[in-house]
Amino acid sequence: MTAVGEINEIVQTVDRLEGALEDLTVRGLRSAGPEQLALLGALHEEFERIGAGHLAGRIGALLDALRTGDRDAAAALLRAQTSLRVFERILTLGSVADVLRGVVEGAEEPS
């Protein structure tokens, strides 16, 4: 897969996580059923696979809190959302750096 294809796949995964976290925020943490927990579990694994261990850890902590009915589940949700925002910014900066690198390298090549 090309770098662009990989980035597109990661962006889709980020969008899925963002939607899942927003759903929990709007509907409430106690509304999280097996389907939402399964989705979060799959997203946890996907972020581990792509090397976003910190974000995967935040999702894992949220999952644990939801499964056990921990009173700190709301805080875990906010930490996961914050980590997601930071990850999005890093992904954006990395993508822009790659594009600029390509432009600079293209400008340096003799015509």
Image: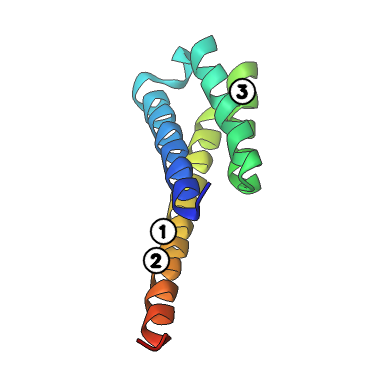
* Quarter residue 108 falls in: bottom left
**Which residue is most to the top?**
34
Toward the viewer: 58 or 48? Answer: 48
Q: Nearer the viewer, residue 34 or 108?
A: 108
**Mark 3 Cα within 10 Å, few/some/many (few <14, many 20+)?**
few
The residue beneath circle 1 is 92
Q: Which picture quadrant has residue 34?
A: top right
The alpha-carbon separation of the residues under discs 3 and 2 comes to 40 Å
Q: Are marks 3 and 1 in contact (CB under 8 Å)?
A: no
Crowding near the residue tagged with mark 2, few <14, some 14–19, many ≥20 C-alpha atoms within 10 Å: few
Alpha carbon separation for disc pair 3 and 1: 34 Å
Q: Residue at horizontal 38%, vertical 24%?
A: 23
Which comes before the other along the chain, label 3 or label 1?
A: 3
Q: What residue lies at 42% left-to-right and 24% top-to-bottom? A: 24
Residue 6 to residue 30: above or below: below
The kind of residue on which mark 1 rests is Thr
Kind of residue at disc 2: Val
The quadrant the C terminus occupies is bottom left
Query: Which label belongs to residue 111?
Result: none
Q: Residue at x 50, y 34 (%)?
A: 77
Q: Position of residue 102 (x, y in %)?
A: 42, 72
- From the image, tell me which residue sits under label 3: 70
**Within-10-Å neighbours for mark 1: few <14, some 14–19, many 20+:** some
The three-letter amino acid code for the residue at tag 3 is Asp
Tell me whether the residue at label 3 lies in contact with that at label 2, contact meaning CB atoms closer than 8 angstroms.
Answer: no
Image location of residue 43, percent across then percent down? 55, 31
Disc 2: which residue: 96
**How many badges with numbers are in the image?**
3
Are circles 2 and 1 on residues that touch, CB within 8 Å? yes
